[in-house]
Image (cartoon, rainbow, N blue to C red):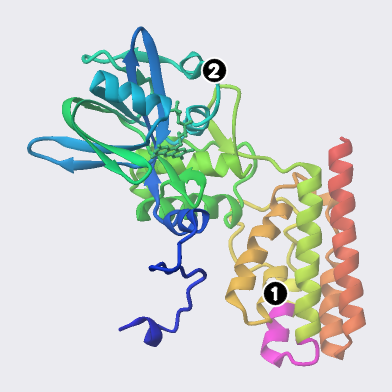
Amino acid sequence: MNDTTEGLSPTESLSGGPRRRIVAADFRRVMGQFASGVTIVSTRDGGRDFGATASAFTSLSLDPPMVLACLFRGAATEEAIRRTGRFGISILRDDQGAVAECFASRHPDRFSTVDYRYGEAGVPLIKDALAHVECRVSEAVKGGTHTVFLGSVHSAVRYDGRPLAYFAGAFGHFLVGDDAAVYSAIRAMILVDGLPPGSPLSVPHLVESLSAEPAAVLAALKRLTAEKRVARDPQGEYVVGGLDLRTALDMISASRTIEVGVAELTVGWVEESDLTSLARLADQPCRAFPRSADGAGPDFHERLVALAGNPRLLNHYRELSTVTAHTGIGPGEAPGDSDHAAIVTGYRDGNLSTVISAIDRHARRLREAWQRCAAG
Ligand SMILES: Cc1cc2nc3c(=O)[nH]c(=O)nc-3n(C[C@H](O)[C@H](O)[C@H](O)COP(=O)(O)O)c2cc1C
């Protein structure tokens, strides 16, 4: 299959030739599509340590073991490596984005900002990196603005962890397929199953229950912590994060918007069988009450949103609806289920404004319950 039959149009297309030059900034953007790891290339010369961030690094040969690194000609580290004929590589870990930034900056003393040690060949190596490689320069080749250093490997050490990734000018995490599945599974436990805030998320337990690698579970928990879905308790253990009032109110408002949108689409168009099942659920306790232990089963609100027949929308709504499961609001304070009945009546009568008023009333009561809860 060629480009035209695939039907994909490029977002950017460059072509050079005798009378046309590819502009460096444009070329950098295209090359930014190549995801890589990030290293610090370093050496020690005249009692001074040199080091620079470099993504232009790759292994070259296994036997003999060789690597290559490309550095801008005339840059301090490049010149120092040409003088000493040796260099070290520290492959950075996913929490070392700040190290990469510092070693690409004009910081007057980059090594004062990190822990490092000297390797067997005497070059500085960044501590807590994923791997260290020390090399002797076997060839230094000029390539455009850069020098390509071919290095014969003197020593190589590997540590556990995940790499710092670099893509399109930004640092990020590298997720293997399994990681993505583990992340989704833990996220669903919190958002769809509605685990209450403070519930422990024990790493060994998750490893066992999800049949996952510990590194995948840890990567997922870190990512969920950054998203504020997960927190650390005072002992440093991972727990389900709590929602602050502002986020909860935003989520209630988003849920309400979805419900109103669904009502606008569906009032007057709903099958009798759908109305019957909605009416059946109207009598059941609203999930504005803390969810009971057996809390499974369809919820009135989810059934309402399902009327739109859009599974993606329903999934998003489910994530928002767990706000109600996290309130800690006592049954006496929960919004009245009479709103559910009013919604069903509006649907039966084909009366959109009755439905929307009931949805609004319900959201308002939920907001008030949250505000009371926050006020203690
Ligand atoms: C993610 C990232 C990757 C980089 N990769 C390279 C590289 O492969 N080669 C290079 O010469 N410069 C690269 N740089 C830029 C250098 O780190 C930067 O120019 C640094 O200041 C050079 O230090 P020096 O002048 O002390 O040698 C990179 C910068 C960043 C942020």
Instruction: Residue 88 in the image: state x and y as whole percent.
Output: 29, 24
Q: Quadrant of residue 52?
A: top left
Sequence order check: which comes first, mark 2 or mark 1?
2
Q: Quadrant of residue 280?
A: bottom right
Q: Which residues are magenta?
A: 266-278
Most foreground residue, 89 or 136? 136
Instruction: Residue 34 in the image: state x and y as whole percent.
Output: 39, 54
Disc number for residue 108: 2
Most foreground residue, 274 or 48? 48
Give the distance between the C-alpha atoms of the residues marked 2 and 1, in whole angstroms. Answer: 58 Å
Instruction: Residue 39 in the image: state x and y as whole percent.
Output: 37, 34
The residue indicated by pointer 1 is 305
- Say if disc 2 is inside 8 Å of ligand 1: no
Give amino acid for label 2: Pro
Instruction: Residue 345 in the image: state x and y as whole percent.
Output: 86, 82
Give amino acid for label 1: Val
Q: Are marks 2 and 1 in contact (CB under 8 Å)?
A: no
**For residue 344, above or below residue 301:** below
Disc number for residue 120: none
Q: Is residue 56 magenta?
A: no
Please give left or right for residue 315 compared with residue 244 in the image.
left
Look at the image and tell me whether residue 65 can be seen.
yes
Look at the image and tell me whether residue 42 can be seen.
no
